[in-house]
Image: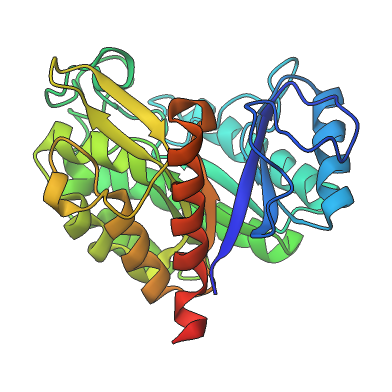
């Protein structure tokens, strides 16, 4: 049985048990197993979100950065500057320690970071991302990318063992090194206790940007994919890009490449990893009330179908 998590983000200072998230998500749904805290406005909002999770007796997870105002910096695991890469490991250590002390079961770090995501994230274009910018990896050899990545993986694997907190790496940007080669499979083969988190909406953007099949990419990394950020991204007829759409069962390969097959990705992952954690990373305001209810019904049925079978 997959575990369904609600994201808690932004301002969160209402009294515990108030019934709604900052985005207006219903927190009293019976299928919530936990909450993932990420991008909260301040440390005060972190404590408000933790209180909410405790009220519901939820499992707690964290996505880095936990909070914004005077909060932790992003982990620049693949920065050109070795000093910045070393700093990223120090930041990750502090973040994992803090998440452990909050009582979190896991922490998610975006990876590779920095990495190109293309213009689609901001404006709807879906040409191949420009990997030649100041943070790009176009002039790195595959082995150089692998070695810098391996330093991060080795550090995070040791950190996971020491802090007794599960660590997942969320695909935030892919370059030709990760698509043409098999760097991720090599890395997870060496450090199999680390996990991968697939953001289904972002994977759709990256796959379309690079002319890839998102389902085939998912299959490549299934053995280590134990976390999902589930939402649907799509391209309107005018080419504009939208994401954070609540996923329902119709979001399948039949609609690709206009609509990310988030439902098919989720089915693949939950069949391979029945105890995976699925964060419904959608914006409940993006659809009608009826469509939102249908998305929740579908997610709840998907989460339990393995056990029912």
Q: Residue furthest front?
A: 290
Q: Is residue 179 left or right of residue 15?
A: left
Q: Residue at x 74, y 21 (%)?
A: 11
Task: Please tell me which residue lies in front, 12 or 118.
Answer: 12
Quarter holding residue 63: top right
Q: Residue furthest bottom?
A: 309
Q: Position of residue 43 (x, y in %)?
A: 82, 25
Q: Is residue 61 left or right of residue 48?
A: left
Q: Quadrant of the N terminus?
A: bottom right
Q: Position of residue 297 (x, y in %)?
A: 49, 56
Q: Residue at x 37, y 59 (%)?
A: 266
Q: Residue furthest left?
A: 211
Q: Position of residue 233 (x, y in %)?
A: 31, 34
Q: Is residue 101 visible?
A: no
Task: Please tell me which residue lies in front, 157 or 10.
Answer: 10
Q: Quadrant of the C terminus?
A: bottom left
Q: Residue at x 27, y 59 (%)?
A: 264
Q: Is residue 45 above or below residue 200?
A: above
Q: Is residue 267 visible?
A: yes
Colour scheme shown: rainbow
Q: Position of residue 281 (x, y in %)?
A: 51, 40
Q: Is residue 141 left or right of residue 82?
A: left
Task: Please tell me which residue lies in front, 239 or 151.
Answer: 239
Q: Residue at x 52, y 46 (%)?
A: 280
Quarter holding residue 218: bottom left
């Amino acid at each position: 049985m997959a575990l369904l998590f609600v994201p808690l983000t932004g301002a969160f200072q209402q009294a515990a048990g108030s019934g709604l998230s900052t985005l207006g998500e219903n927190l009293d749904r019976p299928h919530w197993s936990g909450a993932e805290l990420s991008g909260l406005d301040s440390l005060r909002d972190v404590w408000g979100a933790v209180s909410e999770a405790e009220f519901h007796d939820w499992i707690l997870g964290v996505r880095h950065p936990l909070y914004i105002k005077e909060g932790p910096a992003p982990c620049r695991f693949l920065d050109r500057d070795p000093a910045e890469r070393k700093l990223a490991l120090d930041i990750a250590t502090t973040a994992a320690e803090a998440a452990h002390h909050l009582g979190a079961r896991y922490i998610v770090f975006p990876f590779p970071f920095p990495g190109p995501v293309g213009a689609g994230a901001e404006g709807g274009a879906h040409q191949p991302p420009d990997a030649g910018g100041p943070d790009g990896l176009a002039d790195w050899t595959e082995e150089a990318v692998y070695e810098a990545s391996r330093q991060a993986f080795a550090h995070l694997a040791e950190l996971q063992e020491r802090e007794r907190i599960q660590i997942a790496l969320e695909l935030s940007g892919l370059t030709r090194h990760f698509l043409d080669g098999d760097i991720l499979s090599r890395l997870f083969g060496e450090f199999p206790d680390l996990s991968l988190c697939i953001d289904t909406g972002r994977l759709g953007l990256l796959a379309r940007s690079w002319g890839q099949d998102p389902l085939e990419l998912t299959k490549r990394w299934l053995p280590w994919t134990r976390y999902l950020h589930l939402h649907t991204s799509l391209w309107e007829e005018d080419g504009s890009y939208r994401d954070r759409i609540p996923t329902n069962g119709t979001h399948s390969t039949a609609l690709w490449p206009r609509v990310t097959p988030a439902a098919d990705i989720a089915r693949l992952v939950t069949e391979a990893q029945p105890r995976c954690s699925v964060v419904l990373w959608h914006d409940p305001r993006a659809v009608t009330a009826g469509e939102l209810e249908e998305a929740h019904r579908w997610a709840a049925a998907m989460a339990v179908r393995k056990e029912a079978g």
